[in-house]
Image: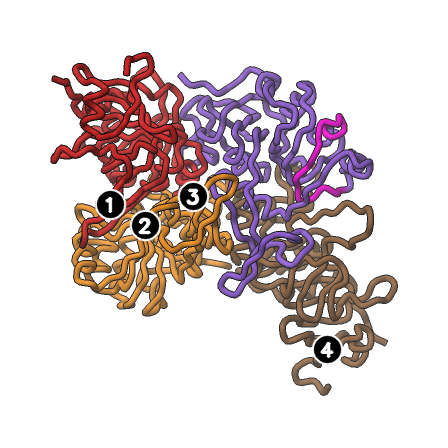
Chain colours: A orange, B purple, C red, D brown
Amino acid sequence: MIDKTLASCRDAVADIHDGATVMIGGFGTAGMPDELIDALIDHGARELTIVNNNAGNGDTGLAALIANRRVRKVVCSFPRQTDSHHFDAAYHAGEIELELVPQGNLAARIQAAGAGLGAIFTPTGFGTELAAGKETREIDGRQYVLEYPIRADFALVKAWQGDRWGNLVYRKTARNFGPIMAMAAATTIVQVSRVVELGALDPEHVVTPGIFVQRVVAIGEVH
Amino acid sequence: MIDKTLASCRDAVADIHDGATVMIGGFGTAGMPDELIDALIDHGARELTIVNNNAGNGDTGLAALIANRRVRKVVCSFPRQTDSHHFDAAYHAGEIELELVPQGNLAARIQAAGAGLGAIFTPTGFGTELAAGKETREIDGRQYVLEYPIRADFALVKAWQGDRWGNLVYRKTARNFGPIMAMAAATTIVQVSRVVELGALDPEHVVTPGIFVQRVVAIGEVH
Amino acid sequence: MATLLTRDRIAQRVARDIPEGAYVNLGIGLPTTVANYLPADKEIFLQSENGLLGMGPAPAPGEEDPELINAGKQPVTLLTGGCYFHHADSFAMMRGGHLDICVLGAFQVSAGGDLANWSTGAPGAIPAVGGAMDLAIGAKQVFVMMELLTRQGQSKLVEACTYPLTGIGCVSRVYSDHGVIDVGADGARAIELVDGLSIDDLRALTGLDIAAPTGASA
Amino acid sequence: MATLLTRDRIAQRVARDIPEGAYVNLGIGLPTTVANYLPADKEIFLQSENGLLGMGPAPAPGEEDPELINAGKQPVTLLTGGCYFHHADSFAMMRGGHLDICVLGAFQVSAGGDLANWSTGAPGAIPAVGGAMDLAIGAKQVFVMMELLTRQGQSKLVEACTYPLTGIGCVSRVYSDHGVIDVGADGARAIELVDGLSIDDLRALTGLDIAAPTGASA
């Protein structure tokens, strides 16, 4: 019998190594896997490269990871927010590297990694600073920038319900980057509000098929 | 009030012009929009380029369209089947052009069109006849072929239920190419077993958001 | 003396150009207020980059759901008939040209339709782009909503943007406190001027050779 | 005299190498029969390219659903815990390296792992490739299941494929009626030979310098 569920977030993140690239789901705090991140902080891995849409909000989740100086580099689209003080401080202190990626290119590059593409020509960012130095090409009269996949060693994702095979459904706009990050990481670790019996998720409604998920931890209903 | 439903398949296909590129959903007969195709045959458009996984099975659907000599070219992955006699005859008579595309590249190129990418580097087909003459590139030690998006003027798709905004859900493996073709065509025409009230489809379960759908026709339960 | 439009009046004016059935993304900040003026009797589909289509108004106090937010991370609601999807599909809607209209704010717009709205290039500032570049190049029509002049009185409608670009030749129309101006490959053309403002006034304010509204005397 | 394996015995042998929890795609034709020999007490996930994961056995007569089929377009069932998805996600599972094992038939396999299984290149034949090229290059391990010799007695394990290629260097192991042979960058190495077949016999049949099974005398 295959059972991908684990008893604790601590067990789930125990093999995340120093220097790992870790995708973290969420758009702002919606979909942010706080409990997994807390476990990652306790675990102690350092020099991480984090891929997330933002660079932390407030003092929890990704912000706490940064505040604890575990992050060497952030790949994101929108670091600067009213409550991104931990990132801001680390950035101004020169302690953290930033790769700024337009949000749609971030999504497309993550999806390309999950789908095994070698590179994509995207129109987003052409002619801007964020495409400086990148290969460009005109195709059918339109200008495109060549962008490469973003892969990760681990993805930390928050979903709503999951089963022991790793099938997932999400809740409202907490879905955001979860499904594509799950496809782009070698090891995808998911916190769910509830683990349900196999078969409880309608096969037509599964958003992330279990093949993309290696570990599932139930943390209880939190919203 | 926006209502994308139409009374008949005939109305739904009335503006498909001679020479149009038409994507047709389905994998074999599962998901094949037979009623829309019958209406297209009655409508009479000629010199069509058809994008489908196959090239018709038996004597209905796409096979009937080919038998009626409406198809100039087929873009597909698997034309030759035990019951593809109408395509076989047209092909051997030199009456129909074939662009053979590996199935995953077909899906990826359709998805790239829907997502507005200019081209993709895919590993599939590298070093084979189907990549002959195409640009290739080594990226991170792996070989890739450059492939371009496949767009269409129209997509004919079979879904299970739809609402007046064009939101769709599918049934079992009849889903196949429907969701990505809906995204890649300028006008997507969908036959559904049943049109349901707005709100009857759970927002978490919608597979094709209405933005990708222009017309919906109810044809009744047929399976 | 010209009667300039308030921000709310600009939003109202933008709303008037959004037809029923349009798929629309309203950028964060000022453009969000356009939603307040969309006619209640027309069905217009608001998309939010973080994965929803059919976005409704803010929830009643106490009804907020932290997992139902808009691109500005404010609580919203979902209309009956709306739906959720993941980020790659959301940006496919933009990049693939499926959105009819996108409304954005701007630091500068050029007569040719270039947009600068993500960075002032100020040294030491932390850059952040979000979905701006995807929206700018993706929607069929990109509307910019802005006051024509900076607080220092400089025109934000310019010959060539001096701030870092968001997209090239992507803006089709500017809705400003001074009037409505089309931009693009053919240059700038005024569509409407507020009461008391002449095309020459607008040319003087911007330093641009803006074409007069069709039918008006130059 | 060597005791060659029947097709069913080859399928049985392949099944023995598929561990619990593996995500597996069984190609159409002969590889499909491997499903008959997977142990009922182990959970193995069968993927079908047309959009399902957790494929179950053929339905009882009369229970067929024309909208629940496999890649060979035969009626199948879905196991509890299985799910459906669209074609782009299905091929992302392959191309993205998410499948552990893919089992394919072949016209020819080279000692270096090249695969030819989609076209004999016969003049006038209608070419058809389906998902073969995606499966060949996508799965972590590609197993080929075939009889070693053609009806004319020619080896299908070859130095270099003469039929049109499906993929380069993609096959890891060949399961044949004569035994199991690893192929790849290091060339061919026999893993198991059927009773009564020596490595020299195999070399003679194939004309290849196949390495002997580890531990065996060359």
Q: Is residue D143 magenta?
A: no
Q: Residue at x 12, y 35 (%)?
A: C152
Q: Secondary structure at mark 3?
A: loop
Which labelled disc corresponds to residue B45?
A: none
Kindly identify which residue carries mark 4: D210
Of residue D19 and residue C181, the one placed in the foreground of this image is C181
Label 1, residues with CA under 10 Å away: few <14, some 14-19, many ≥20: some
Label 3, residues with CA under 10 Å away: few <14, some 14-19, many ≥20: many
Q: Secondary structure at mark 2?
A: helix
Q: Is residue C55 visible?
A: no
Which amino acid lies under the numbered mark 2 shown in the image of this protein?
Glu
Q: Secondary structure at mark 1?
A: loop
Label 2 close to label 1 by CB (< 8 Å): yes
Which amino acid lies under the numbered mark 4 shown in the image of this protein?
Ile
Which labelled disc corresponds to residue A129?
A: 2
Looking at the rendering, the stretch of residues picked out in magenta corresponds to B65-81
Which labelled disc corresponds to residue A123?
A: 3
Q: Residue at x 68, y 76 (%)?
A: D189
Q: Residue at x 34, y 33 (%)?
A: C112
Kindly identify which residue carries mark 1: C119
The chain that hosts pointer 2 is: A
